Amino acid sequence: MKRIPTPLIALVATVLAAFGVSFFSDRIDPYYLDVMIGVGINVILAVSLNLVNGYTGQFSLGHAGFMSVGAYLSAAVTLLAGPRLLGEDGGTALQQGLLFLAALVMGGAGAALAGLAVGIPSLRLKGDYLALVTLGFGEIIRVIFQNVESLGGALGLNGIPNYTNVFWVYAFAALTVFTVVCLVRSTYGRGFLATQDDEIAAEAVGIDTTRYKIVAFVVGAFFAGVAGGLYGHFKLTITPTGFDFTKSIEIVVMVILGGMGNTPGVILAAILLTVLPEMLRAVEQYRMVLYSLLLIVLMLVRPKGLFNFNFTAIAARLRWRYLAARK
Amino acid sequence: MAAAAAVAALSAGSRAQEPIKIGEYASLTGKEAAFGQSSHKGTLLAVEEINARGGVLGRQVELITEDNQSKQGESATIVKKLISREKVVAILGEVASMRSLEAAPICQAYKVPMVSPSSTYPKVTEIGNYIFRVCFTDRFQGHVLAKVAKDTLKIRRVALLTSVSSAYSVGLAEYFKERFTADGGQIVIEQRYTEGSKDFDAQLTAIKAAGVEGIFVPGYYTEAALICRQARELGITVPLFGGDGWEAPELVDIGGAAVEGCYYTTHYSPQVDSPVVKAFVAKFQARFKGETPDAMAALGYDSAGVLVDAIHRAGSTEGAAIRAALAATSDFEGVTGLTAMDRERNASKAAFVIMVKDGRFTFVQSISPQRIAP
Amino acid sequence: MTEFLQQLLNGLSLGAIYALIALGYTMVYGVLRFINFAHSDVFMVGAFIGYFAGEHLPHDSIPGGLVALAAAMAGCAVLGIVIERLVYRPLRGGPTLNVLITAIGMSLFLEYTGQLVFGATPRAFPSLIPAKVIAVHGLVISINQLLVIAVASVLMVALELAVYRTKIGTAMRAVALNPKAAQLVGINIDVVISFTFGLGSALAGAGGILYALNYPSIDPLMGVVPGLKAFVAAVLGGVGNIPGAALGALILGMTETFIDGSRFSTYKDAIAFAVLIGILLFRPAGLLGRYSTEKV
């Protein structure tokens, strides 16, 4: 019998665990719950950006723009279509859940389209230019939302229903990691890495770098959009300025800290960079100064990232020791 | 049995000595630190005074303040933290309407009363019946400004220069326009800008070409000061006027001679000849190194005062009881005037018209709600 | 007609400021092939140097203003050289992505340390130059605007002379063309690069003072938006090309001013980026740039 692949087991296990935790969520301190949800959302953002920046080497500084597209679109669905579909009483939990799922997927799809729109012009660009153009797209998206009155304009949307909970966040976080890991282990992953290593050489051996770049952008954007939807239904208020360049940078710092192209490292970094600021609220004003110093020092001293351990080697060594001890 | 009763009585007694926790969320750092710091000082002074008088319901008041750094998204988190971890009985905040809108749904969901010192955007209290404010709304402020334009400045043709990045500015502009045109005035031209802009030459040039008698700038002081400067540099001599977002010392620092003769409305003036105001100004100056309290400080002071008064009248720290008492506030004498909560949980109060004269904010007149009833 | 001419003048003045910043970007990119993200914050530091200098200088006097200008230029030159030495030089020769990330980190560091030290609320920049206004046929020209255009022109001419008539300028051009070959003929790359950074930063500092004179409200984040627009201007004109940067800045300044006065003023920020994307899609070398083939 064929072995069920580990990623799939991990996915199912995480989803079940998330469901379980969510069941007992009223026993848990709401503040801790909040932090957990924040961690989950950041994991989705960081892992999805890692696909674009880390694996495919396309340095994107506009991830928050995709997040905002997802946030706005999903909020529009729940705010506008919600009352009509759910009726006066708000519907049952199952109905709400289905609506939320639909809203998140639509938000992600919209963000994916935006990813396509950003990815295609960026194909010819490298390094610095790409960074700037993605930054520019992020800003353009922000300005557009600031001017669209039906989505609240500069005031944004509020009164978004509070649908986000631990289950949804961690289910999608698991899905994101699962998707990225599967992609990376497949031929696509080879394509991503080849594109990152040396684009011209890759093209020379017949790899369609265009396709891989676009796939990276679109998949990354989709999950950023989902994260945006989760964020919107968590904070209950979204404004265009909340998804600006600073937010993009925060996600970039997570990817760099974790090590570009290192999914477990990036997950650790996302957890650390969500929990640490909460614990250090007293010195909040130093946060961005520390982040920027971290970026500089990391690049000078350990550009591969802080958490870039060779997990496979460590796992192999541990397994060896376990097997040896059993004898 | 008697021992158990004694222990119960003792612990009840010691529990009664536990302070009553009130949460405050404000922009103590970041872009709007000036407002947040000001309102925080007013609130702090009020709480210290209340505690010096013995507190309320026999217990001291503990003010727990959290900083949202003037950033989006932070207010929601810190309010949840105040409610769930610190178990505050009520929340004070915020100065800016956008951030109040962020925290209000959370306070409403957890049934914790929230009292905003100076958020004037009408939608804030519409979020739910646990949300109150001790200031007037922009609906009222817009109508007052329309009246000022018509009766004090005596102008009929006005240009509108609105900040599209803030709920406050957009709302105030709408209400001004509504009343000004209903009274026979004309909005000749509307221009817009985003917060953070430094250059308004383009908009002002267009306004100048349209030939107006006055320019209404319902934004915050940073841009208002620059707008006045650039207007004067372009040779525009007509008056500029605005709302309570103008009030900050930076208006005169940055605006200089350009803001002379300009008008704005706000919630209070330290120059008002009333014993309550004079006492407040003296106490504030003594506590904060000679600083004269501005409208934000006064409103911060009153928000704490109104809340504690409601706790006193409710006789308990239960959310629903405080809420009912707040809604029933009918004649609280605050430093910003007599405060009563109307049915929409907004304070029905007078607006103060201020003119900049010789670089100082000079009180001109106060306009009460009755005077501008249509 | 008057309105049109007035907007033209406003655009010229805005474009001149963008030009000063753009020159720094374009020079550094030409020599080192990377975008110095921290450049916009050097601009901000220049404005703050002027602010603090202004506390010791007489207000409303032209000599006072010029002293502040010189101080800002000198201070920023030093800052630029120090940043290059400490942070960029160790990474030279490595992957460009790392330098990019470091530059972003440096930029953020300057911005947020500035916020920590100076506070985030805007400060009033002292009126160092007499703020007078000349009215000509309904057109209003402020002394500040004239000063901006004059100083920017003088500096640009000086830069052209420095780059084309001096030894170090020739060395700069050599390094921009081919760093390895330049080393082979005995040019000290380190000195040239430091000089480039110093020069570019000095211009940014000048830009900061002129900007603050015109828009006297300064805060630690003031450089972000003008910096991005100046970079767009540099790309528009052809990155690495000095007259191109000036041309691009002028065009961008004009376009922005006219959009600002129209119905679409709130799209102003997006316009700069739309221009960037358009240029990179259709004419990546810029208006005055030349295509170069990349050899592998």
Image (cartoon, helix red, strand yellow):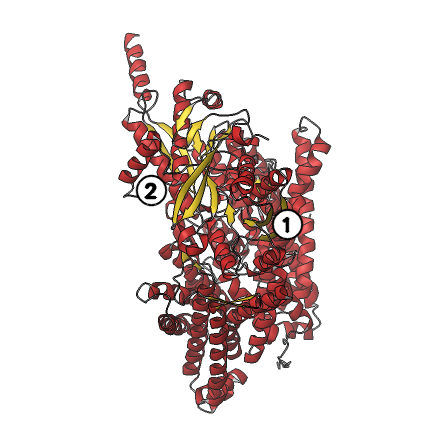
B79 lies above or below A63: above
| Amino acid, disc 1 | Val
State whether residue C215 appears in this view: yes
Residue positioned 47% across, 61% down in the render: C215
Mark found first going from the N terminus, 1 or 2: 1
Residue positioned 45% across, 79% down in the render: C196
Disc 2 marks which residue? B292
Q: Secondary structure at mark 2?
A: loop
Q: Chain of mark 2?
A: B
Query: B257 or C273, which is in the foreground?
Result: B257
Q: Are marks 1 and 2 in contact (CB under 8 Å)?
A: no
Image coordinates for residue C275, horizontal then vertical, percent:
64, 66
Q: Chain of mark 1?
A: B
Left or right: C159 in relation to A92: left
Residue positioned 43% across, 22% down in the render: B331
Image coordinates for residue B94, horizontal then vertical, percent:
46, 38
Disc assigned to residue B87: none
Disc 1 marks which residue? B188
Q: Residues within 10 Å of mark 2 (few under 14, many from 20)?
A: some
Image coordinates for residue B203, horizontal then vertical, percent:
58, 57
Q: Residues within 10 Å of mark 1 (few under 14, many from 20)?
A: some
Image coordinates for residue C273, horizontal then vertical, percent:
61, 63
CA gap, disc 1 and disc 2: 38 Å
